[in-house]
Amino acid sequence: MTRSSAIQLMLIAIIVATVFAAAWSSRRTHHAADWLIANRRLGAKLAAFGYIGNATSAWTLVLVTSAAFVSGLSAMWVAGGFLLGTLLSMSYVAPRLRTMSAAQDAVTLTQFISADAGDRLQPTIARSAAAIAILLLLLQVGGIVRAAAYFLHEDAGNSIVVTAMLSVGVIAGCVLAGGIRAASLFDAMLTVAMGFTILLLPLPAIVALGGWDGLTSGLIVLGPTMTDWFAGKSGVVALALAGGALGLGSAILGQPHAMVRLMAVREGRSLLALRWIAPLASAVLLAAALLSGWCARVLYDGLQHPEQVLYALATRLLPPGIAAVFVVALFTALMLSIASPLLAIASQCAVDLRRPAALLSSGWARFALALAAVASVLLALLVPLDLSRHGLLPFLALGAAFGPILLVRLSGKRLRPGSMLGAMWSGFSLTLIFHLLPDSPGDFLERVLPFVASLGIALTGGERRRNPDRADRAQETVHDRIPI
């Protein structure tokens, strides 16, 4: 059997597996709340895989391997940033977000952060948040679809158009049937696929290098910057390099498709298990990604595209038949990572773009998901999205727009509507502006300053509520003002 035939057979097997996942989740989905948020009864494993698949996604792990290939030991700051974000999410955000979102009956992150804005401006804030989220998530999905389709085209000669349309169609159809449970199963599949890839590929690489000593000596030979914690930088530049890398973790707090898993998980043991599983699994995956990047740098120093580190290790070290398994695993992980963003787009349309008093409608949400799938395919095929250059933009912009507001809301403070709008749009706009400017050390300007600016606006516009049962002073009655 040729390598191309093996890839086609494995792709068919993946499609069959996704259909079974959709059938399983569809039988457990009965109404709109089930479809959107599993009626807040998502199990620990599905919630953990759902969170990991979005906070430490396939593209995140590819980014870490690329950073390790390019920067050597200093890439540990990048991995540490993502791990720090997961630790913050599990220790501080998860228990508070689960309790407060249930109390407010919020089913999306943007609905939760805008719920305390009062009747007059709440629709404006919710729709602004939805507009930002939909735009950025569509860019993210379109970039991933384009990168994955080109990846399979270059390796197996598959048509880019057919690959994009078929992949998005199958994934969107399965999410249409099973909602958040189907998306969480896909996140589990992509986490297993990426774990299989980055945990096993370093083994033949270490053997080819002659053991751990061969790896360390090889990094030393490549130059002192490869074994320096700050890549040879010092002073303010070194601090900016580390700060920019650690700033990646704060962006996790603003990802709607990751935070919704914390809102959907079942309370009690499931929530406790999620808070342990997610950091441990993330730490293992990030460590393996670093090792893969370091091994590839020593073995293939002249590799022109660092984002192809895992592909190079698979195709150059392994026999063609075995390499095909890793190629399909990489492609599968990338494509399955679009399921949760597509579901998040549908949730924004079904909840935040409608009247606040409107009942949840799974039909409208499914229609919105179908439109999002079509838009993402058109975006992937017609717009030259370069994931290696712009892949982090949606991630960082979402983090700067929503992360600071979420932190302030979880602290128990009420945000004034004007401050909420200012924090949201300043985080989004500053990220976009700094992204268009030349890169700073560690991309400090793009990764840190927008989040800090948004957090500053949110904190200065916050006030601790005297009466937690009253959402807005405009809703006070005479009895609230005159003691009885």
Image (cartoon, rainbow, N blue to C red):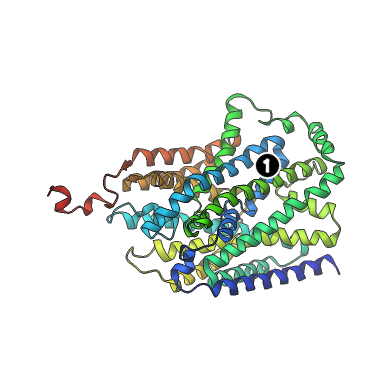
Left or right position of 289 against 33: right
- The quadrant in which the N terminus is found is bottom right
Q: Is residue 316 above or below residue 153?
A: above
Residue at 35% over, 55% down: 115
Left or right position of 31 against 1: left
Residue at 79% over, 54% down: 314
The answer to which image quadrant residue 182 occupies is bottom right
Query: In x, y percent, where is residue 89?
Result: 51, 47
Q: Which amino acid lies under the numbered mark 1 shown in the image of this protein? A: Ala
Q: Secondary structure at mark 1?
A: helix
Left or right position of 136 against 56: left
Query: In x, y percent, where is residue 430?
Result: 47, 42
Residue placed most toward the observer, 101 or 298? 101
Residue at 69% over, 55% down: 194
Residue at the limit of the structure toward the top, as seen here: 235
- Residue with the mark numbered 1: 67
Does the image show residue 443?
A: no
Query: In x, y percent, where is residue 398?
Result: 49, 50
Mark 1 neighbour class, 10 Å CA radius: few under 14, some 14 to 19, many 20 or more: many
Count of marks, rendered view: 1
Query: In x, y percent, where is residue 232?
Result: 69, 28
Q: Is residue 385 above or below residue 230?
A: below
Residue placed most toward the observer, 158 or 341? 341
Does the image show residue 424?
A: yes
Q: Is residue 306 above or below residue 452?
A: below
